[in-house]
Amino acid sequence: MERWMRLGTYHTVTGQHAGAWRVSTQATDSESLAQHVAAARAAQDAGLDFLLVTDVLGEQADPQRPHEVRADLVPRLEPTALLAALAATTRDIGLVGSFSTTFEDPYHLARRLASLDHLSEGRAGWNVVTSFQALASAAAGGEPLPPHADRYARAREALEVACALWDAWERDAVVRDRRAGRYVDPARVRRVEHAGPSFDVRTVLPSSRSPQGRPVLFQAGASEAGRALAADHADVVFTSQDHLPDARKFYREVKHRVADAGRDPDGVLVMPGVVAIVASTRAQAREVRARLDEAIDDERARRRLSALLGWDTSALPADALLDAAPAQTEGHRSRARQLHERAVRERLTVRELARVAEATRGHLLVVGSPQDVADELLAWFEADAADGFVVGPAVMPAGLRRFTRDVVPLLRAAGVRPDRPHGGTLRDRLGVGAPTGAARETTALNR
């Protein structure tokens, strides 16, 4: 099977680095449709495969000061509305949204995503996530946040129900038979009858089979439960990796799990996130990083680091080194473990680790000239640590322009990026093939 480097981008107009909007001299209005469209078109014109819109529920406050609105709060547009607007203003770039299964039901998720796939002519994707912040629970009715294992059990059930709803429509179910007065042939549509621990769904999705059959399924958790879910259902495993040996190990494990689940390992992609700082020279890129890091509020960064790690770091001096004790958290378990391991491996102080977390969100940080950045991505790709990358420019919009104008051509010259997309749908572009996996039991409409 032909192997090429897939490339997506975090969709943002404020930049991935926490200090980016303070440093950038260009407009960074997070609720401006014009700026979102400009960023999406820039990614499209550079031939990137997709853009990913992330979302975090309950982010209105500081994790350790839940009754205070964060001083660095950045407003967000709701992903479905934003992606629908981008579907109308782009033509051939994938549109992927993060939607949580913890507080949303599979019927409404399936309907919104099927609609997006129709409106975009087959470019929709779902980044399946589970909410981990207690503040998200407060925003969604106040019920206690379920334990980690329960959240993933619910996610698995939600995903299976959504797939059953999508699969219940045959491709030729819409007949528009004027003579017989039938818009849909009921024999080609089945009613989903699902009764499970979390959901009771007995209905027909009011959206016909979409251009891709199902949206492309991304899975973002790297815990044991997350890896198991990815092996059974994901088309793309979106992961946080910042150390090449660990990334290679993770890549091999994912491929083995996929094979053990009876699926084709080549049809499931592993794509780490990357935060990129690109400048004309390595020295200039390092200067940009230094300016960005100086714009970080260290006190707020430490409080959020504590929330990520699952324990309070405030008792430690800012210049103290972290010991080798494992991180414990009910939230981002894999991200917490990765940050802690990085602190121990690189002998980072608490202040330095907090800044790393603010700069990268736990992803790989690549700083340098266009050739430096291209070489780093090529090294990971050729070492079988990644099938591609989700690149988040540290600063917007200049960072995206730098990456697409200066780095992507180097990857094409290296022979790992195609000159033209492989097809019209997101599945075609990524080469992940047709949807697989059995749907739940269904009942024909006319029975």
Image (tube, rainbow, N blue to C red):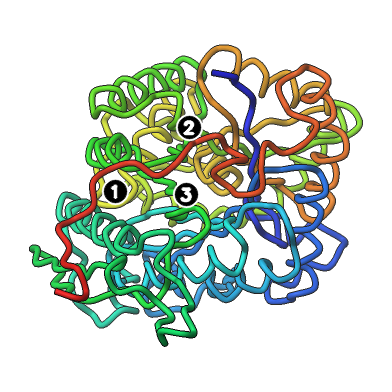
Q: CA distance from mark 2 to mark 1?
A: 33 Å
* Residue type at the position of mark 2: Leu
User: x%, y% of residue 296?
Assistant: 64, 53
- The tag earlier along the polypeptide, 3 or 2, is 3
Label placed on residue 447: none
Asked if the residue under mark 1 is in contact with the one under mark 3, i.e. CB atoms within 8 Å, the reply is no
Of the two numbered discs 3 and 1 in the rendering, the one whose residue sits closer to the viewer? 3
Q: Write the residue at 63% across / 43% down.
A: 8
Q: CA distance from mark 3 to mark 1?
A: 36 Å
Asked if the residue under mark 1 is in contact with the one under mark 2, i.e. CB atoms within 8 Å, the reply is no
User: x%, y% of residue 360?
Assistant: 58, 43
- For disc 1, the neighbor class at 10 Å (few under 14, some 14 to 19, many from 20) is few
As drawn, 99 above or below 174: above
Query: What residue is pinned by disc 1?
Result: 311
Label placed on residue 216: 3
Q: CA distance from mark 3 to mark 2?
A: 11 Å
Query: SS at mark 3?
Result: strand
Q: Is residue 43 left or right of residue 438?
A: right
Label placed on residue 269: 2
Towards the viewer: 440 or 61: 440
User: Residue pushed farthest right?
Assistant: 280
Q: Quadrant of residue 130?
A: bottom left
User: x%, y% of residue 120?
Assistant: 62, 64
* Residue type at the position of mark 3: Val
Q: Quadrant of residue 75?
A: bottom right
Q: Is residue 73 left or right of residue 183?
A: right
User: x%, y% of residue 253?
Assistant: 33, 21
User: Residue pushed farthest top?
Assistant: 383
